[in-house]
Image: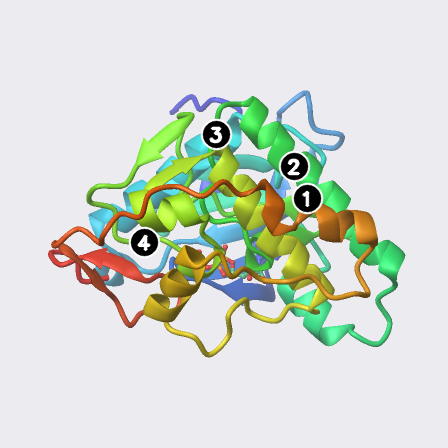
Amino acid sequence: PIFLSVWEFHQDDIDLLSKKLGEGAFGEVRVGRMTTKDPKMSATVVDVAVKMLKNAESVNREQVEELLFEARIMRRLEHKNVLRTYGVSVLREPLYLMSELCTNGALREYLKDNQKTITLADKLNFVLGSARGVEYIHSQKIIHRDLAVRNILLAEDKTPKVCDFGLSKLTDRYEMKEHCKIPVRYLAPETLELFVFTSKSDVFSFGCVIWEIYENGQQPHDGKNAQTIRAQSKKREFLKLKTSAPESLRELVGEKLIMPHKETPLPPNFVFSPHDKFYYAPATCNS
Ligand code: ATP
């Protein structure tokens, strides 16, 4: 027999249910029932979300590595406001990544679908919980790099859980040289100009998350292209929070915390990609 760590599972330990939770770049996310021997788990059979990698022909090596990288990062994290990952199943295809089941789905959809019933207290809880998750991630020396309401899930009791560590880095400063994917709508001016990510640039993106929460899941800078967003950022024209948001939050997300710095031209090998979610791409990348 093959002996597995508590982190590794056989596919037979996972009972896939028919309920589909969503679909991402990697493939489907389904509800599953997982049998575990982990003494830290409250029960031996737990309901989980199973991210399944699409069939082997349609995924490339890079995607498999990205999924395993994400799993390795998430494995280190244990916090109420960060999506808990239970383990992987890699012995047989398709690959599975099992995580905590968030029955209220993605925060973005929740905000859009429940505009009439969400209270200001709910919104403040989303902000506060997510902020605690980000603070914890930073305490573990991880930069998330893709904070947005589409990457926050809601548990059954509406506790927000930060997720999607596909772009995250285990460092306190990351300078982008070859990376293809960055979410321009959420980036700090220093990132747009110098291509440097730190926990502080995550904090800027978190300001955009707060904006999204008070705008009921609307996309920041909707309808604007990457050049326009970058030009506005250079002029220090940022998103403004609605007056329905508490005054203290509006001050926190205000412009006065952002220091002006020298303008840097776009390096010659960078072009703007027309991709919907990510914008800068070195000319050699085709994402
Ligand atoms: P990508 O990975 O391409 O950036 P994504 O983040 O939307 O895209 P997934 O992480 O694969 O892709 O998730 C797809 C959808 O499945 C989510 O938007 C969400 O609705 C649902 N989902 C994912 N994980 C869970 C979970 N743990 N609990 C409940 N629903 C989930």
The C terminus sits in image quarter: bottom left
Among the two numbered marks 3 and 1 on one chain, the one whose residue lies closer to the N terminus: 1
User: Residue flagged by tag 1: what amino acid is it?
Assistant: Ser
User: Residue flagged by tag 2: what amino acid is it?
Assistant: Gly
User: Residue flagged by tag 4: what amino acid is it?
Assistant: Lys
Which residue is the site of mark 3? Answer: 142
**Vertical placement of 109 versus 270: above or below?**
below
Q: CA distance from mark 4 to mark 1?
A: 23 Å
Which residue is the site of mark 1? Answer: 130
> Which numbered dot is residue 133?
2
Give the class, few, some or many, for how many residues have Cα within 10 Å of label 3's Cα (few <14, many ≥20).
Answer: many
Secondary structure of residue under mark 2: helix
Which residue is the site of mark 4? Answer: 181
Secondary structure of residue under mark 1: helix
Q: Is mark 3 within 8 Å of ligand 1?
A: no
Q: Please state the horizontal and vertical placement of residue 194, each as a whole percent of the image.
A: 30, 43
